[in-house]
Image (tube, rainbow, N blue to C red):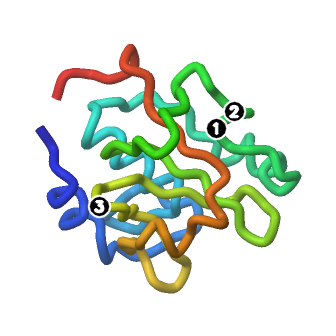
Amino acid sequence: MTTPKQIIDKYEGIKFVKNGRDPNIGLDCWGLCLCIVEDIFGVTDLPDPQYSILRLLRQKISLIKQYDMAYWTTPVKGNLAFGDYIVINIRGITMHGGIYMEDNKFLHAVAGKGMLLADLNDWKKNVEGVYRLKKEHMKEK
């Protein structure tokens, strides 16, 4: 079973690349999500809204809520688990996300800084939602 420490060690420090989907080249926040969800849950078929949802994101439409809730559910408030996807609102626009690790920390992609571990308390006012991959989409790892 993959642990938060393994994920942090693997991804922290990887450079940020807009629309990045390859950790060897660089990732953006959704690319990071895709890679981590594959590592933790074995899921390789998550929809990639990189292009189709971009215009909607700029109109304040939540990435996961509007794109494909078939894959996601909302966990009990305050009951975050390793691998939960955190949707973040920046300057009034839903445009960022990260993956919950443990101990109130999440991993996310920051332009100019790369993949960083951050304290969720520092982002609390910007969290728009938390989503958990539905069990029926998880694969054996």
Alpha carbon separation for disc pair 1 and 2: 5 Å
Q: Which residue is mark 2?
A: 67
Alpha carbon separation for disc pair 1 and 3: 24 Å
Label 1 sits on what residue type?
A: Ile
* 106 to the left or right of 109: left
The front one of 89 and 53 is 89
For the residue labelled by badge 2, is the local secondary structure a helix, a strand or a loop?
helix
Q: Position of residue 38 (x, y in %)?
A: 32, 39
Q: Quadrant of the C terminus?
A: top left
In front of the other: label 2 or label 3? 3
Residue lying furthest bottom in this view?
112
Label 2 sits on what residue type?
A: Tyr
Q: Which residue is mark 1?
A: 64
Alpha carbon separation for disc pair 2 and 3: 29 Å
Position of residue 72 relative to residue 52, above or below, is above
* 113 to the left or right of 3: right
The front one of 44 and 67 is 67
What residue lies at 52% left-to-right and 75% top-to-bottom?
122
Label 3 sits on what residue type?
A: Asp
Residue lying furthest top in this view?
136
Question: How many residues crowd mark 3 within 10 Å: few (<14), some (14–19), many (20+)?
Answer: few
Res 138 → quadrant: top left
Marks 1/2 in contact by CB < 8 Å: the verdict is yes
Q: Position of residue 34 (x, y in %)?
A: 43, 45
What residue lies at 83% left-to-right and 57% top-to-bottom?
58
Q: Which residue is mark 3?
A: 103
- Nearer-N-terminus badge (2/3): 2
Res 133 → quadrant: top left
